[in-house]
Image: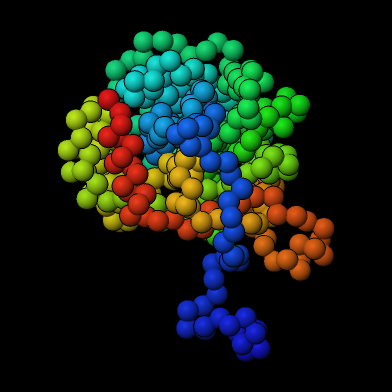
Amino acid sequence: RRVLFRSMSVDPKVGWPTFQHAPLVARSAPLGTVARPLPLIVDSDPGLDDALAIAAAVARPELNLLAVTSVGGNADVHHCTENALRLLQLYGASDVPVAEGAVGPLSGPLERATEVHGEGGLGKTVLPPAQRRPDPEGAVALMARLIAASPEPVAVAPIGPLTNIALLIRSYPHLASKISHLCLMGGSVGEGNSSASAEFNIFADPVAAEIVFLSGISITMIGLDVTHHAWVDRSILPRLAALPGRSAKVAAELLTYSFERSAGWGQGERMAIHDLVAVLHLAIPDLVGVARYYIEVDATSGPARGRTIGDAWKHRLVRDGRVPNADVGLTIDRERFADLLVDTYAKLP
């Protein structure tokens, strides 16, 4: 043990790192610009932080939001679908199609995060009923149609369980080349949150996640390693209150619910806005620092079910014939992140 400490330069007073660190590299995710907005589909389970992520997908001029599809996760899928419709209506984007997707995972038990997001997904916030119904063709068919029809490859931001994305890959394999990138919120190369090993979105359907990471499609994994640093506290509330739009008032309600919940759990009054990071990464070139990893998903039924195992050690990857298959978010400019949240809601009605 003493030899290992010396050779790896680990300070025994600090202890071992919680995950295998890898050097930051240039991003592989495409980047939208104002001159050429990035075609984007958001696959979501709204969701407190999903609501803020969808706001950015609507407001950021670098993104061209083609659709929002729903999946069961933070709440029942029917609540998630209605939440997506109501949020887009609030944000002045009722022309963006919405379609309902998978109720539950490809395999295994149904998982919900209602203890975090409330039974309906949006805490105690009640939005006016949507004035339209979801697209009847369903999430996977809608995604396939939009991707096939797009003159340029489409990015997808899956910010819920990956069930719909796995079904898209399995059902329409010929469209893989027309998906420019999957910038997903999920996973962790460190610790989990649904269990000691697994982050919720992967834990909710690890079989689907395994399909996605083995697909060969370009992926960025925005996991807990970076999103736990993407937090805001009550100092954000007066900044939102100063904005004129109703959307900003709703954002403040959602955040207040989260602050009170976190305080009740003894975690302090702050909220990590996980899903927003995945959307902003496609619009902001230098917000998130990424490293390359080979990500393997534990889809077994054991205590590590849902874990995303990240390997970045070159010698072992070469030995095992593996090539890194994902960018993994590791760093973020937190103060700038908070500014971008306020700027998002300054652009909305």
The image quarter containing residue 8 is bottom right
Colour scheme in use:
rainbow
- The residue under the point 71% across, 27% down is 175
The image quarter containing residue 114 is top left
- The residue under the point 68% across, 29% down is 178
Quarter holding the N terminus? bottom right
- The residue under the point 37% across, 55% down is 334
Q: Along the horizontal axis of the image, is 219 left or right of 223?
A: right
Above or below residue 131? Residue 319 is: below
Above or below residue 177? Residue 220 is: below
Position in image of residue 294 (x %, y %): 69, 55
The image quarter containing residue 120 is top left
Position in image of residue 341 (x %, y %): 33, 42
Do we see residue 54 in this rendering?
Answer: no
Quarter holding the C terminus? top left
Q: Along the horizontal axis of the image, is 65 left or right of 48?
A: right
Position in image of residue 320 (x %, y %): 81, 61
- Between 305 and 296, the one lying in front of the other is 296
Position in image of residue 314 (x %, y %): 73, 66
Q: Along the horizontal axis of the image, is 89 left or right of 248?
A: right
